[in-house]
Image (tube, rainbow, N blue to C red):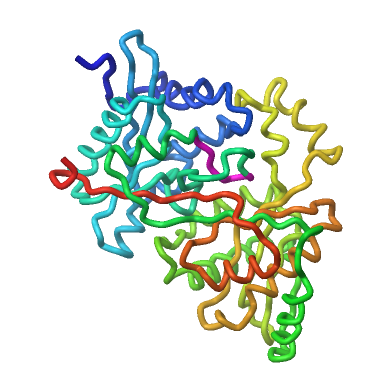
Amino acid sequence: MEDFSVRPVKGRREKAAFIDFQFRLYEDDPYWVAQLRMDIKKLLNPRKNAFFEHGKMELFLAWDEDGRVVGRIAAIINGMHLKKYNDRVGFFGFFETVDRQDVVDGLIAAADAWLAKEGMTAMRGPVNPSLNDTAGLLMNGFESAPFVLMTHNPAYYQERLAEAGFKREMTLWAYYIHRKYAKVDKVRRGVNLVRRRNPGLKLRTLDMKRFKEEAATIRDIFNDGWRDNWGHVPMTEAEFDHLASEMKQVVDPRMAYMLELDGEPVAFAISIPNMNQALIKVRNGRLLPFGLLKMLPRIFFGGIQEVRLPLMGIKKAFQGRGFDALMILETVDRVPPLGYPACEMSWILDNNMPMRNALESLGGTPHKEYAILERPVGPASA
């Protein structure tokens, strides 16, 4: 007889338990970085997360006989994904569990049943709650903390989810580049050739006084440039506005670039400080009363020495012309003098060989590997 039960989350107290579980699960993991509780609450709140304008989600908790949470999962419907692909693929996310196969199987069964009732035939993830948010199961690279807005999980998740019937659908890579070891000469020769072939190119930093207009341009480039990429789902205006407002708080305009050709914006790249180097000190996910005091010394006294490049896009009509290498080289040239000698460029799709080749030519190393998994739902998964 099972000594646990899985049931949907009901009410504020159970939602609080859903959020709290990860803090207990990772209390002995030195590399885990707590996501701020207020940010998790926003993600799960239909009134504050624009995802819920087209998507929906059901949260489940696994409880042991003593009333303690031993696992959690969210079953997710992404309306924009279904509109684009019409493939009856649902998703799972916010997945955390103790190291027990029966608990994992129980959580997956609950998400499976809910997705089947919604008419889905496959379950993909983890996504929290979409590929435009934090996503991917960490497969390799457990020996260091994740960069900002990247995931982290115990190594045993791989085996447990494989036993539950999941197979890898796509690999996501995180490339690490340190300015000291960057091989810039070869790439610079190629970029100089790109500039000669395109004399109307101009690289500029974002105009923060026109941030709303700049963000709209970035959204258009992103949705156009990524539209044929695996799994891409266009961001709605409301979703991108929310992302832009969050980014504005941490973006240094000296690390945010727009590339124009003959006056037309054709590409962008945005790097942000790796705030996880400060957040790792806030183990309980609360800034007040003491979390902020723990972060401030790292923020203001050189404790943050890395950036992450999470957003880069090139309009479809201008891809294959070397603009990606140009943007990467500019990042490697311009960011280190600002006090950030190292950069993670993530995530990169496994099948995006032009980008991977450009990063490896520059001396980038794939230091973390993530995976998006998938399995059938309904009768096919039984």
Q: Tell which of 182 and 308 is nearer to you.
A: 182
Relative to 89, say whether 4 is above or below.
above
Q: Tell which of 116 and 14 is nearer to you.
A: 116
Judge from the rendering whether residue 106 lies leftward or rightward of residue 255; answer left or right.
Answer: left
Relative to 90, say whether 336 is above or below.
below
Q: Quadrant of residue 208?
A: bottom right
Report x, y in % for residue 61. 34, 25
Relative to 186, say whether 18 is above or below.
above
Residue at 76% across, 54% down: 252
Residue at 63% across, 44% down: 148
The quarter of the image holding the N terminus is: top left
The quarter of the image holding the C terminus is: top left
Report x, y in % for residue 34. 59, 31
Report x, y in % for residue 87. 25, 60
Relative to 228, say whether 308 is above or below.
above
Judge from the rendering whether residue 110 lies leftward or rightward of residue 257; answer left or right.
Answer: left
Residue at 75% across, 31% down: 295
> Taken as a whole, is the magenta stretch helix, strand or loop?
loop
Q: Tell which of 226 and 182 is nearer to you.
A: 182
Q: Which residues are magenta?
A: 147-153
Judge from the rendering whether residue 168 lies leftward or rightward of residue 342; answer left or right.
Answer: left
Report x, y in % for residue 183. 75, 68
Q: How many marks?
A: 0
Q: Quadrant of residue 341?
A: bottom right
Judge from the rendering whether residue 142 lies leftward or rightward of residue 163; answer left or right.
Answer: right
